[in-house]
Image (spheres, grey):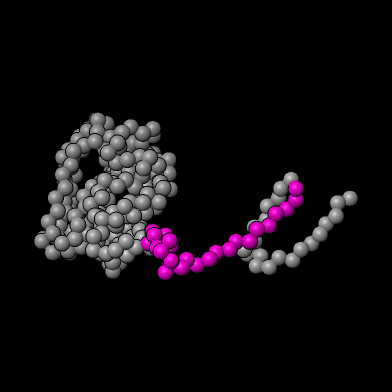
Amino acid sequence: MSKTNSIQLKNKDKVSVYQTKNGVITTEKTSTPLNENNKKNMRTISLRNEFAEAVHATTQFRGRFKSAAQQIKDGTVHQRLVASFRKLLQKDTVHERGERMVEYGDLTMIQGFEFNDKSKFGINFNAPYEVAVNRVDGLASISIPSFVPQEELKEHTNATHFKLIASVAAFNFETGENAGLVLNSAKFPISTDPTTDINFDLPFTPNESRHLFISLGIVFTEVLDARDYALYGGEHNALRIIKVLPKV
């Protein structure tokens, strides 16, 4: 008969227990604060600070684009945005390493960002479009000439209709102030019949000086008995940042 021994564990919330062929092993998690005066730790601290800055910017960005991206299914968007913000803040020449900020980085590096990495906008939508932004008047315009959906859209099983989503957003990542607008097009059948011209006029504050982001996306649906049904939980829907204008 095996003998059982009981032991008393302190700080149980910090203890991990592992079963092995030779018995049970317990380990206690420990952490030692980094000494900021130690030169060996300075780089680690700098990287940690800038990672936190990128995460904070990502939270702001996703919050503003939540409405436009709510029908986009991609579990990697957060980590990809964090990686993008970490890269662009390294272009900040105003602050030293460890203090660099997204607000002073190269925000144009976000242009082309896809909210759905597995179903990119450029693959799903091939029709030409033009983007114009007038800061003085406070207007961003997206013009899409008439096109034939079956020729310009990627085919998806059971998709019968689509709509386009456009948005404009103004950001100051340092203060956290942001504002924006989201517009939806009419719903169009995916057929050989040409669409009408599709135009989005997205107003924002005249003489806006903050960073501006313009996005364009597509949502596929199946219409059955006059009811709209999401297609595969939105996994084919796409949204792209099509234009970025740095602050002035």
Q: Quadrant of residue 127?
A: top left
Q: Nearer the viewer, residue 68 or 170?
A: 170
Q: Position of residue 80 (x, y in %)?
A: 37, 49
Q: Nearer the viewer, residue 126 or 78?
A: 78
Is residue 228 one of those drawn in magenta? no
Residue 184 makes an appearance in the image: no
Count of marks overlaid on the render: 0
Q: Position of residue 72 (x, y in %)?
A: 37, 47
Q: Position of residue 233 (x, y in %)?
A: 43, 44
Residue in the image at 70% along x and 54% along y: 25
Q: Residue furthest front?
A: 39
Is residue 46 one of those drawn in magenta? yes
For the magenta stretch, what is the residue range?
Answer: 22-47
221 sits to left or right of 183: right
Q: Residue furthest left?
A: 136
228 sits to left or right of 213: right
Residue in the image at 29% along x and 36% along y: 123
On screen, residue 155 above or below 209? above
Residue in the image at 85% along x and 55% along y: 3
Residue 14 makes an appearance in the image: yes
Residue in the image at 19% along x and 50% along y: 200
Q: Position of residue 95 (x, y in %)?
A: 27, 64
Q: Tell me the quarter of the image containing the C terminus.
A: bottom left
